[in-house]
Amino acid sequence: MSLMNSIMNFVERVIAPFAGRVAGQKHICAIKDGFISTMPFLIVGSLLLVLANPPGTGNAFLDGWHAVIKFIGRDNIVGPYFVSMGIFALYSAYGIAYNLAETLNTKGVSPMNSGMLSMFSFLLAVAPVVWTGDLGGVIPIAYLGGAGAFTAIICGLFVPTMQTFLVEKNIRIVMPEAVPEKISASFDLLIPVVVMSLFVGVINGVLGHFDLNIATGIMALFSPLVDASDTFIAFALAILLIQLLWFAGIHGASVVLGVIGPLLLVNLGANQEALEAGKELPAIFINPVMDFFVFVGGSGGTLALVCLMARSKSAHLRTIGKMSFIPGVFNINEPVIFGTPIVMNPTFFVPWIVAPMINASIVWSAFKFDFVSHVIALPPWTMPAPIGAVMSTNSMFAAVVVIICFIVSGLVYYPFFKTYEKTLIEQEEPEQLEREEQTLSPSKAH
């Protein structure tokens, strides 16, 4: 038990406070909230990409699927993908700057203006106009999606910070008080627009001598990090951190994905681009791999535990299990985490860590050896696990892997669940006898 206490103390005194500071850091929050704001576009766009790419032919359903696509026209189905997931970095540039400006709350810096200036700067950096004879000026989209995510982050963070600096140094165009507020705010944006135009133009001009621009240069700098993110070590470490943070009562997924989320979106973009080009899908580690495969029922893979609890002899566990089943089907497991409780409960520490790590090994192997197609879509994380897994991969075998992970989680949790159940039953039996005596005592007195 001394080792267990040491681990719990380390989590409580070191990991939890550090994670709390990271989760509350305003720039990280702006990045996380900026990307979250793009989620409706990512979900719809990526699901339409799945719809436009049936897994094969050979039966009436798939043949009918192909016929429907041919009738509607594949370009009409894929079109929304290119203006949603295909350019999500553009939306992110706006969302990140807006959220950071809102957090900084600097007088004279409008969040909407910051978002617009961030988009302006991002487009200057990654999408220079190309002039063609037939179409006039066209904007390339190569770096408007996943490949431009890091440039969007830099623009989104830099623009509000620069605007705040200019306002604090009183480098601004001050309009008379009689001028309406919105018009005055638009003039506040003039100097920042000039600054960003010159700044981006000069950097792209210098990089152009090396056959680079801001987008390609930033992607080259971050490519080792992107490559490292798509490894089993990174996958397992992310899961371990999520579990440790949740055990300390902190929303682990929110903290960890707030940091690595951009890398996973780059991986998703790489898979979708490869799918459109008819190439092999390169990336494994993308959000649905955790959401639907490893964490069946929510962080910790607790749906199997909930099923065990629903049939428990302990009244407390049985109540929590029944209350938690429906939310657990939709990957919402706060009721079981805090109701059991699992948080800071030594009995559940081992299975809480071990079950997801075993599942991670199973899932990674299934993807690595091509038993399951790689992820190409981003369904809502509240989708029931087998359905979400199939939709994200367009592979029916994904549901089999989910069921295997569900069973493995149940086997790992079972002995620890029985131990905790026995403890609770021993506590509940005297209370039950006391209640029965209190119920019978009035009739005896009578």
Image: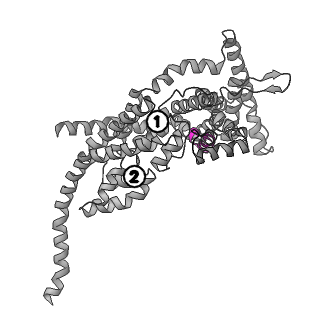
**Disc number placed over residue 372 in the picture, else none:** 1
Looking at the image, tell me whether mark 1 or mark 2 is earlier in sequence order. Answer: 2
**Is label 1 or label 2 in front?**
1
> What is the residue that sits farthest to the bottom in this orientation?
446
Q: Which residue is drawn at 64% across and 22% down?
A: 215
Instruction: Say what secondary structure mark 1 lies in.
Output: loop
For the image shown, how many numbered marks are present on the structure?
Answer: 2
Quarter of the image holding residue 278? top right
Residue 129 counted in the magenta span:
no
> Where residue 405 sits in the image (x, y, percent)?
36, 43
Q: Residue at x 36, y 33 (%)?
A: 361
The amino acid sitting under disc 2 is: Glu
Residue ID for mark 2? 334
Q: In which quarter of the image is the C terminus?
A: bottom left
The amino acid sitting under disc 1 is: Val
Q: How crowded is mark 1: few (under 14 residues within 10 Å), some or many (20 or more)?
A: many
Q: Residue at x 25, y 51 (%)?
A: 417
The magenta-colored residue range is 34-48
Relative to 314, say whether 434 is above or below: below
Quarter of the image holding residue 50? top right
Tell me how far mark 1 sits from mark 2, CA to CA.
30 Å
**What type of secondary structure mainly makes up the magenta span?**
helix
> Where residue 322 sits in the image (x, y, percent)?
35, 61
Inspect this view and state whether residue 251 appears: no
Q: How crowded is mark 2: few (under 14 residues within 10 Å), some or many (20 or more)?
A: some
